[in-house]
Image (cartoon, rainbow, N blue to C red):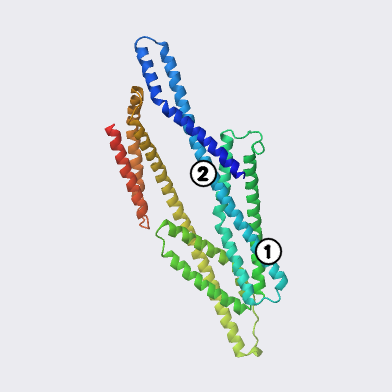
């Protein structure tokens, strides 16, 4: 993106909106006096003044709406632009590092595959699994980049920054954003396709040096540690941060489980059948391996089912919390807006302005009751008892703010 030019233009647009708002604010009292003078002239019989007064008030309201709209749009555009620049840089930096790592693994595999021992091959495989987990965790960052860029495009087109018939080429800033979005999608798709291929290749190099017994022992150790981690994390579902961290941990565990599927396939390959000549010890080892193999497969399936179940439960819990928090945030924003209006309404610029404020207060009382009822309903639904104390406290604070606002309206 043309970051310097973008920021200068955004600041210029924001300054223009602020200046318009200041001019309107400075002349608000003057407008009020003009409107009151017009009303007096109407009462004295100058009927034609009423038309001019109405036109003046309409133009004032239109200018006020324009100033508010420009200020809101500029603020939103600045925040989206900052997010797009920041997240794009972070994602690009990580993608470069990921490609460098994959290149080193490929080169070392070709040049020294014969000299590498089993531990070195295992280490490369585990590092690639870690990269696969990073790829999963960077999904939210990628979504943020695409979301911010797409919203910027829509916003700039909506406010007339580009020609609707040629939106991608008429504005260099739009062209830059479109180009970055396409490059981000292409780079991401490439990594999603290439990382699993490299992982499978490194896994195969490691498995080439393992026996079935060795592969079985590796999986027994990994499954035991994974089960312990799953049980430990399940006991710490209290705060929102805990839920998010546990979900990431479980999703990473699912990536590891998928990565070890080829190890399980090696364990499950048909083993040699021992004949009578093989001796009692050979038959015993064969039977023991078959028993261990059966237990491992059962353990694997049970763990897979439990892991998927807990991931689904966590995702549903987080969705429910996100919906509740979004609803509370909307109500809080509305309350804040009404408080700001109440502060400005304390000093009316004219008799007309005072009458408008009184009429609005009458409508406001019913709306406040509706918001308070919505808050109470939201609080009553929080009966699961799983770490919602902080959220309940936020709701109670909002209920009290509603009560304070009701008192202010009554006093006015």
- Which residue lies at the image location 46% right of the left edge and 54% below the top edge? 316
Looking at the rendered structure, which numbered label has been put on residue 103? Answer: 1
Q: Nearer the viewer, residue 71 or 186?
A: 71
Q: Nearer the viewer, mark 1 or mark 2?
A: 2
The percent coordinates of residue 286 (x first, y second) are 60, 83
Q: How many numbered marks appear?
A: 2
In the rendered image of this protein, does residue 320 appear above or below residue 17?
Answer: below
Looking at the rendered structure, which numbered label has been put on residue 223? Answer: none
Q: Nearer the viewer, residue 98 or 6?
A: 6
Q: Secondary structure at mark 1?
A: helix
Q: CA distance from mark 1 to mark 2?
A: 36 Å
The percent coordinates of residue 275 (x first, y second) are 65, 86
Query: Viewed as shown, does residue 294 lie left or right of 319?
Result: right
Which quadrant is the C terminus positioned in? top left
Q: Which residue is mark 2?
A: 79
Query: Viewed as shown, does residue 342 lie left or right of 137?
Result: left
In the rendered image of this protein, does residue 24 appear above or below residue 322?
Answer: above
Q: Nearer the viewer, residue 136 or 345?
A: 345
Q: Secondary structure at mark 2?
A: helix
Q: Mark 1 vs mark 2: which is more N-terminal?
A: 2
The percent coordinates of residue 336 (x first, y second) are 38, 40
In the rendered image of this protein, does residue 382 appear above or below residue 106?
Answer: above
Q: Quadrant of residue 283?
A: bottom right
- Which residue lies at the image location 62% right of the left edge and 60% below the top edge? 97
The percent coordinates of residue 66 (x first, y second) are 49, 30
Which quadrant is the N terminus positioned in? top right
- Which residue lies at the image location 62% right of the left edge and 43% below the top edge? 2
């Amino acid at each position: 993106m043309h970051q310097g030019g973008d920021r200068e233009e955004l600041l210029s647009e924001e300054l223009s909106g602020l200046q318009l708002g200041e001019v309107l604010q400075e002349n608000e009292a003057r407008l009020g006096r003009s409107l009151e003078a017009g009303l007096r002239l109407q009462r004295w019989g100058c009927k034609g003044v009423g038309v001019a007064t109405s036109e003046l008030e309409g133009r004032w309201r239109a200018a006020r709406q324009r100033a508010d709209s420009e200020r809101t749009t500029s603020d939103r555009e600045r925040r989206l632009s900052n997010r797009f620049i920041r997240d794009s840089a972070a994602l690009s930096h990580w993608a470069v590092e990921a490609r460098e790592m994959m290149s080193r693994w490929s080169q070392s595999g070709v040049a020294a595959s014969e000299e590498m021992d089993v531990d070195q091959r295992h280490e490369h495989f585990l590092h690639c699994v870690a990269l696969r987990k990073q790829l999963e965790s960077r999904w939210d960052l990628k979504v943020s980049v695409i979301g911010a860029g797409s919203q910027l495009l829509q916003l700039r087109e909506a406010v007339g920054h580009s020609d609707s018939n040629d939106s991608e080429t008429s504005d260099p800033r739009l062209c830059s954003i479109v180009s970055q979005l396409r490059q981000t999608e292409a780079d991401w798709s490439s990594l999603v396709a290439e990382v699993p291929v490299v992982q499978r290749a490194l896994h195969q190099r490691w498995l080439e040096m393992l026996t079935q017994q060795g592969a079985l022992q590796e999986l027994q150790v990994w499954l035991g540690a994974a089960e312990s981690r799953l049980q430990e994390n399940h006991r710490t579902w209290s705060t929102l941060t805990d839920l998010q961290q546990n979900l990431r941990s479980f999703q990473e565990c699912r990536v590891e489980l998928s990565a070890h599927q080829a190890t399980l396939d090696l364990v499950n390959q048909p083993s040699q059948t021992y004949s009578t000549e093989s001796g009692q010890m050979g038959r015993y080892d064969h039977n023991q391996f078959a028993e261990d193999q059966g237990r491992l497969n059962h353990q694997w399936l049970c763990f897979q089912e439990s892991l998927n179940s807990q991931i689904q439960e966590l995702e549903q819990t987080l969705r429910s919390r996100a919906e509740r928090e979004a609803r509370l945030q909307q109500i809080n924003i509305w309350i804040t807006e009404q408080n700001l209006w109440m502060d400005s309404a304390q000093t009316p610029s004219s008799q007309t302005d005072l009458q408008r404020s009184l009429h609005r207060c009458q409508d406001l009382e019913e709306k406040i009751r509706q918001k308070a009822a919505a808050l109470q309903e939201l609080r009553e639904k929080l009966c699961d008892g799983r770490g919602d104390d902080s959220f309940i406290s936020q709701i109670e604070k909002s209920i009290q703010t509603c009560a304070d606002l009701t008192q202010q309206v009554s006093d006015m």
